[in-house]
Image (spheres, rainbow, N blue to C red):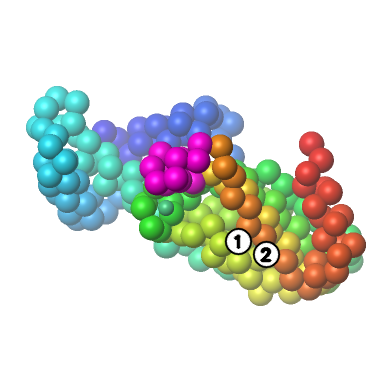
């Protein structure tokens, strides 16, 4: 399978066609042959151990596909989120709250390597510097494409923005559903986990309330 097929597969799973793919899902699909071969070997063994026949027609290419899929899903390790932000910092006097809401999040829980997915809402109050709006979803995505827990993901997004543009405050809320809860274990099908990380001005109740009101309105 060509690398682009893997990419398209992932896009169609996300319910998007190629033309309307948001910027933060675009990346160069470069798979390391050694890593692909190594992971594929392990997946082959795993299928056998689980009682499957990895040589049957439908599974012949599965180990390789899984190996490439995981390289894609975990590509956040090789990207520096701070560099993304630094590439688009602008001096600006604007000092009102800037909110980017409903950012799609797809990540893998580090306990089960199963997906958790949902939405992130990010706000900051500039202190002389703003950042290109498209960079915020990109930063969320880079941290999400690692093995994560939702709590840490939330804090990492806040801290990266705080460090690079030093605003008066940053707020991050993530609402996500975890397949490790929905498909196994507690089997709580519809539970949504909400995490938040606030700093600076967002420690003030009024500012926090305004943010929460902005992200809850549709
Ligand atoms: Zn889990």
| x, y percent for residue 71 | 34, 51
Numbered-mark total: 2
**Residue 152 at x, y percent in the picture:** 54, 65
Q: Say above or below: 1 vs 31.
A: above
The numbered mark at residue 197 is: 2
Above-or-below relation of 125 to 212? below
The residue positioned 12% from the left and 44% from the top of the image is 49
Residue drawn at 34 percent across, 48 percent down: 70
Please report the residue visible at 67 percent of the width from the left and 64 percent of the height from the top: 197
Is any atom of residue 81 visible in this view?
no
> In this view of the protein, can residue 34 be seen by the observer?
yes
Q: Residue at x 17, y 51 (%)?
A: 42
Q: Which of the 4 quarters of the picture holds residue 119?
A: top right
Q: Judge whether residue 186 is colored magenta.
A: yes
Residue 78 belongs to magenta span: no
Left or right? Give the position of 180 relative to 41: right
- What range of the chain is rendered magenta? 178-189
Q: As drawn, is 116 to the left or to the right of 9?
A: right
Q: Which residue is mark 1?
A: 154
In the displayed structure image, the side of residue 171 where residue 10 appears, left or right: left
Disc 1 and disc 2: Cα gap in Å? 6 Å
In the rendered image, the quadrant that contains the N terminus is top left
For marks 1 and 2, the one nearer the N-term is 1
The local secondary structure at tag 2 comes to strand
Residue contact between numbered discs 1 and 2, judged by CB atoms under 8 Å: yes
Q: Quadrant of the C terminus?
A: top right
Packing grade of label 1 (10 A; few <14, some 14-19, many >=20) is many
């Amino acid at each position: 399978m060509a690398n682009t097929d893997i990419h398209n597969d992932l896009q169609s799973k996300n319910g998007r066609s190629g033309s309307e793919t948001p910027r933060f899902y675009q990346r160069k699909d470069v798979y390391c042959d050694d890593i692909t071969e190594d992971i594929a070997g392990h997946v082959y063994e795993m299928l056998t151990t689980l009682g499957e026949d990895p040589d049957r027609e439908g599974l012949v290419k599965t180990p390789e596909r899984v190996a490439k899929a995981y390289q894609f899903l975990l590509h956040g390790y090789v990207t520096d989120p701070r560099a993304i932000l630094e590439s688009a910092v602008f001096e600006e006097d604007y000092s009102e709250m800037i909110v980017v809401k409903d950012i799609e999040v797809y990540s893998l829980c580090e306990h089960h390597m199963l997906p958790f997915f949902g939405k992130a809402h990010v706000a900051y109050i500039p202190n002389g510097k703003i950042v290109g709006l498209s960079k915020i979803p990109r930063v969320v995505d880079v941290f999400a494409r690692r093995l994560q827990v939702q709590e840490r993901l939330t804090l990492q997004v806040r801290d990266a923005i705080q460090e690079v543009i030093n605003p008066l405050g940053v707020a991050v809320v993530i609402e996500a559903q975890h397949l490790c809860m929905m498909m196994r274990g507690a089997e709580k099908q519809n539970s949504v986990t909400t995490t938040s990380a606030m700093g600076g001005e967002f420690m003030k109740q009024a500012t926090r309330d305004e943010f929460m009101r902005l992200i809850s309105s549709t």
